[in-house]
Amino acid sequence: MKGECAMVRAAEGEHGITQEERRAYEERFAAFREFAARERGAILKALEG
């Protein structure tokens, strides 16, 4: 994702995040994307029926 990469680069440049911090961020972001996809599916299903 274009926005995600820009955010990571900005965070690394400004704050010098470690690899562990970056990995934790990426895991949280992936979990959020999964959550958003489930919610979007539920909303679309509710609107259809």
Image: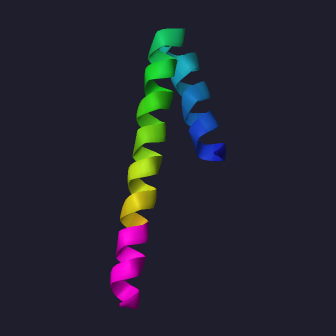
Residue drawn at x 51%, y 24% as measured from the top left:
11
Is 37 drawn above or below residue 17 in the view shown? below
* Relative depth, front residue between 33 and 22: 33
Q: Quadrant of residue 44?
A: bottom left
Q: Is residue 13 left or right of residue 29?
A: right
Is 4 drawn above or below residue 20 in the view shown? below
Q: Main secondary structure of the magenta part?
A: helix
Residue drawn at x 50%, y 20% as measured from the top left:
23
Residue drawn at x 40%, y 60% as measured from the top left:
38
* Relative depth, front residue between 45 and 30: 45
Q: Is residue 22 left or right of residue 28?
A: right
Report the span colored magenta: 41-49
Q: Quadrant of the C terminus?
A: bottom left
Is residue 46 on the magenta stretch? yes
* Relative depth, front residue between 42 and 33: 42
Q: Is residue 45 left or right of residue 12?
A: left
Res. 44 visible in picture: yes
Residue 4, how many percent across, how many down?
57, 39
